[in-house]
Image (spheres, coloured by chain):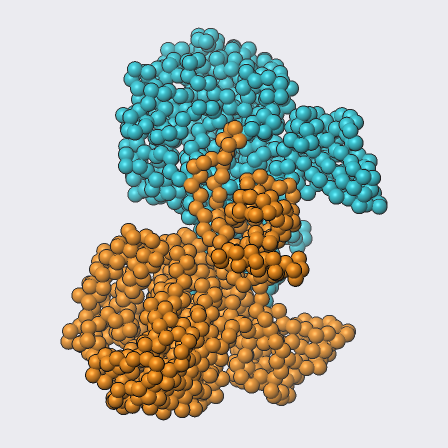
Chain colours: A orange, B cyan
Amino acid sequence: MKLRIYLFLAVVVSLFGEQAYAQKASWIWYPGDFDIYMSNVMQNRRTERGAFFPVFWKMDSHYVLVDFHKEFDLAEAEEVKLYVEGTYNVKIDGQAISGFPKTINIPAGKHKLSLKVYNQARVPAIFVQGKTVVSDDTWRSTFEDKEWIDASGKTSDKSGTTFVSAGSWNFTDPLVVPSSFKLPVTPLSAVKTEKVKNGSLLDFGKETFGFIKVHGLKGKGKMNIYYGESREEALSTDKCETLDELDLDLSVKKDSVMPLSKAFRYVNAQYGGSVTADSISMLYEYAPVTERGSFTSSDQELNKIYDVAKYTFHLNTREFFIDGIKRDRWVWSGDAYQSYLMNYYSFFDAETVKRTLWAQRGKDPVTAHINTIMDYSFYWFLGIYDYYKFTGDKKFVQDIYPRMQSLMTYINGRKNKDGLLEWMPGDWIFIDWADQLSKEGEVSFEQLLYARSLETMALCARLADDQTGAAQYGKQAGELKKKLFDLYWNEQKQALAHSRIDGKATDNVTRYANMFGIFFDYFNADQKSGVKKNVLLNDRIAKITTPYMRFYELEALCAMGEQSYVLREMKNYWGGMLKLGATSFWEEYNPDKKGVEHLAMYGRPFGKSLCHAWGASPIYLLGKYYLGVQPGTPGYETYTVEPNLGGLTWMEGKVPTQQGDIELYCSRKEIKIKSAVGIGTLRLKSKSKPVVSGATVNLLSKGIYEITIQKGKEYLVKYSAVANHN
Amino acid sequence: MKLRIYLFLAVVVSLFGEQAYAQKASWIWYPGDFDIYMSNVMQNRRTERGAFFPVFWKMDSHYVLVDFHKEFDLAEAEEVKLYVEGTYNVKIDGQAISGFPKTINIPAGKHKLSLKVYNQARVPAIFVQGKTVVSDDTWRSTFEDKEWIDASGKTSDKSGTTFVSAGSWNFTDPLVVPSSFKLPVTPLSAVKTEKVKNGSLLDFGKETFGFIKVHGLKGKGKMNIYYGESREEALSTDKCETLDELDLDLSVKKDSVMPLSKAFRYVNAQYGGSVTADSISMLYEYAPVTERGSFTSSDQELNKIYDVAKYTFHLNTREFFIDGIKRDRWVWSGDAYQSYLMNYYSFFDAETVKRTLWAQRGKDPVTAHINTIMDYSFYWFLGIYDYYKFTGDKKFVQDIYPRMQSLMTYINGRKNKDGLLEWMPGDWIFIDWADQLSKEGEVSFEQLLYARSLETMALCARLADDQTGAAQYGKQAGELKKKLFDLYWNEQKQALAHSRIDGKATDNVTRYANMFGIFFDYFNADQKSGVKKNVLLNDRIAKITTPYMRFYELEALCAMGEQSYVLREMKNYWGGMLKLGATSFWEEYNPDKKGVEHLAMYGRPFGKSLCHAWGASPIYLLGKYYLGVQPGTPGYETYTVEPNLGGLTWMEGKVPTQQGDIELYCSRKEIKIKSAVGIGTLRLKSKSKPVVSGATVNLLSKGIYEITIQKGKEYLVKYSAVANHN
């Protein structure tokens, strides 16, 4: 029946002209290859004071020679158009067609169409468009077709080639090749301009990103452009982090757009010789994602925090999820892991998650941890499982599973005699930017992430139908988890020790492993409350000063119902940046610092990034722990909603999913909820039994009720909120 | 003292202008990367009847982001010019210089100069030229510099980066970037032209290779060019293997050179529409190698065989050692292995050997055997050890050793429960082109090559200072060798069985393992003579019909002193091709075939290559087993000369080495020898004690004498040859 509908559509659509096809074609490539290629393009755009500044880890490449094929069964002969990025051949049933045909005819019946493409410089890609013969991710691809023949010309029937589903995205225009992909731009003007020395200082009003455009440029001499995320940085011509220097000799006025996009709020343009310009504007460059998630509440400061967080996150959502727009503009796994989570509560852009995961992992062999950082390898595994949890996209897990295996094989190969991980040449143990943070010996935090990654491997092995792997990884995870508690749990301190040196746990307790242990649900109830009291809420344990680790610290507290406390912390910490004039959130914020001290990092006066993705975590916290929405089974087939006002009078917002939004309004007396997806469980604490029409209210335990939320229905629940214990 | 001479030279040379430097700079890259890049360029030039025809195995790429550095200690400040293929940065002592400087100044004293280069499309390469600061293979390079910093900006002192010596060749012109490398061409004309249909058939007199050039092309319509290694092929417009089709609309006369070089002797040019041309010529494309080896003798037919073999080999010596110039024009490991050996007795071009070995191996991970063929993986190992034996170049072995390890790890991972190799998905078991050749079960030939490769690993491990590896591989080799005889040696048949099926050796005896066992010296004296009688000289054992395996068959016989027999075989087999008008030697020659049957292969009437490198083995046999020269210790530090006339009245020739030639004249009464290298041992059979002035003659055993040959001296030895026992 379905097939008939399609055929019917094909007829209808063909009435509208030759170019209208029933089946939608898209550019396809070897899975992961566009992502790796594009990440090379992007990560090689960084400059520091005019010098090219690429990554320090191995950059991989696309496969340069790729074979694509699909079998079709045609009711009638079909004319098929071919668009290829690269040198190629075309075969029908294994017979090559001479030259580089742009149109071929496939006869009726069962036929195999193959294209083999070579491209050293760019990703080999094809776009095939016939009436029913179209390129899409149902095509099979390989980088070694192993199709040898014997002396008689007979093709081997024992080749053993491994084919995988082709990769694709939203490239449906045959005339725009994948490698030409660019983010869109839109013109923007400065909000204020003032004279400074031999030029002017422009203020674009807030942190922004794009290409500076100089209008009506003329004369002979130099023009220097100094970029600043702060006014101080733009004015510091010898210390600002990014700049452009133009050597000009123009007798006629000309507009000029800088070749590389930059992050800035302020731009200091200085003219030398006889150079003049009419004006300066910018082309704002952005990822065309949709702002699907939302949050507003009775607290205006919190709303501002949410909005600035979302703007910060949008700026750092580009071809990939990057760390910061001024620098490094690279794809860091630990940073991206947080971006994925924020993304699920804002844009829900699955493609950027997948692209970033492919790009980070690159190709085999594994010669170092992801970004060379041990913890960052682990976040990569965690990111894949979260992706599956939020999207239910099993195919992606299957596609990337072989690369998960090879990374885990690399890591397993680096265990010491006690089966633990410690520093080896080539490893960067990062954890966090924090003074005096010891990385000696076997750090508990790394073992904890290792255990979680092994659990993830076991889960993904099952999805990829690798039962042996699932059993092995599961066993290894269990053993390591047990070891973690045997070796690091300090009964007296009621906390995991920071590390083990010379085979002995140290007395040092830090927040890292302990707070992750909470939301990994690794502790029993006693251990949990011990950790909460002795670590999380203990001021004598070294404070965290990066929004990066604040993310997890606050998540751990939320996971234990401390929303009121976390709300105050958010207002203090993120509100603190806003009070200092932040228009986007920073890489690091230490309330104890003063004035320009806030701008410095890495020994450079303007080294700090003032627009860092990891600064945007309120998006995630508010969506997951206040609106309280999270998937129960993968892809929101089932989900839970546990609203927690955390001291707010009311809040409302949307949580996006692959299939549509979950919308929620919550006050102390009323909850309105509507969902486009799955089956939800609204769980709430109420002094009285909630009242709702069209659903049953179940008592879960004393004062806690559950209501099942069906797709597409709107519910109004009357209840009486319990005062939060904080 | 040496240093002073250089400094003195520096002063002298600088008198001759700014461009003259004491130190020679060359383009450098990550080792192996130019080779892999260039092999992609070359192997993607094949076409078959106008369709692009690339390889079916995985093509690898250069590293796209490479860091180069070297430390210099300068007596005085120096201006240094930089030429870079790619986007780059330059650092002096870790401090980046803004922009893309073409000239930098390095102050006096100790400084580290680094360049980091990104190039997706072509090999990242640099050329650095100062007075003393120059780029060469003493620079260090890496594809992951792992140079992270902490929050204070301090660079990690624990990065653990692996640096290797840069790769280089003979690219000493800063204005010619490595990726633009092309073989030279020279114009040639046809020797005969005849009218054929609407055009003409050109005969270039012999097999050749290059670009067809059409002079004074004009008119509207098509021009078709059909290439033929034979007249029949060029005339067969619908079956010839290669062709060019031009679609023209030229109102003014224009010369046109075909974009791709082709192999041919005959060219059939056909004009359509109003198209005309004044004439057709070719640009002969060739590798600029020197013909250092030589051989002439009292036998004119043999001399012709040698000359045609050398021409055949020269045509197939290109950017790499390829299989055949018509097809596949690819870098096949089994074919190249023979080319290496021929090369040591002709061009002695070490660079082409190294380039071919790098190209074949590509990058990790290993996902298939080399060229997907099990035996071809083994030849690759053997080729490395031979390279070391002939050149003494230990550095190359050390450079490539990690890739030897990963290939052997791949192979070891494919052993079956009995520790033997048999077919697994993805494997091509080739052995030879031969009908009814069984590849079922565990083929003895593959196990034999496996054992030899393990021995090679043990030897190379020692050179690479991997003592553990040396011990392990040595042990594994010994065990496998023992197993080979335990499982395959048939006492009754006095031969190794062809294979083992279902755990039982078959009755089938073939030549392959048995003849390799001879020159691998795996047999004891009894086994040797058993094999000789029961296999090699036994007509009931299936005959070999490719020059490829004739190579080894004749080598085995020569190794047992059967030079007279082999001489007759050479005259029959290669002489047989000459009698059929061959101007180069073929991929396969079966004397039983007739007429155009000789041209067919792979089910195609002109599928056979008439110019195949493996057809040129007389070069090797005559040099090694008649002139009788071969290295004793690596790089000809010591060597042996055992002339064997094999029935000839006299012969003379040169055998090249890295340091110079070994020249030899030999008749039945007189031997003249002169060597530019090492210490030689002339070993000869003589009825009487040889007489020589300036050297001592030692009696080795009855009738066998040895004379030590010193470098640079000419020796005239009078002796009395023993009649050959054949």
Q: At which x and y percent is residue A419?
A: 24, 58
Specify whether residue A674 is in view. Answer: yes
Residue A462 position by quadrant: bottom left
Q: Is residue B605 left or right of residue B669?
A: right
Q: Residue at x 61, y 27 (%)?
A: B605
Q: At which x and y percent is residue B275?
A: 81, 39
Q: Nearer the viewer, residue B662 or B556?
A: B556
Residue B397 position by quadrant: top left
Residue B186 vertical position relative to residue A426 in the rendered view, above or below: above
Q: At which x and y percent is residue A690?
A: 29, 86
Residue B544 vertical position relative to residue A560 in the rendered view, above or below: above
Residue B421 position by quadrant: top left
Q: Residue at x 69, y 31 (%)?
A: B237
Q: Is residue B3 left or right of residue A187?
A: left
Specify whether residue B168 is in view. Answer: no
Residue B339 vertical position relative to residue A641 in the rendered view, above or below: above
Q: Nearer the viewer, residue B410 or B607?
A: B607
Residue B179 vertical position relative to residue A249 in the rendered view, above or below: above
Q: Nearer the viewer, residue A81 or B271?
A: A81
Q: Is residue B132 left or right of residue A605?
A: right
Q: Residue at x 39, y 74 (%)?
A: A711
Q: Nearer the viewer, residue B167 or A168?
A: A168
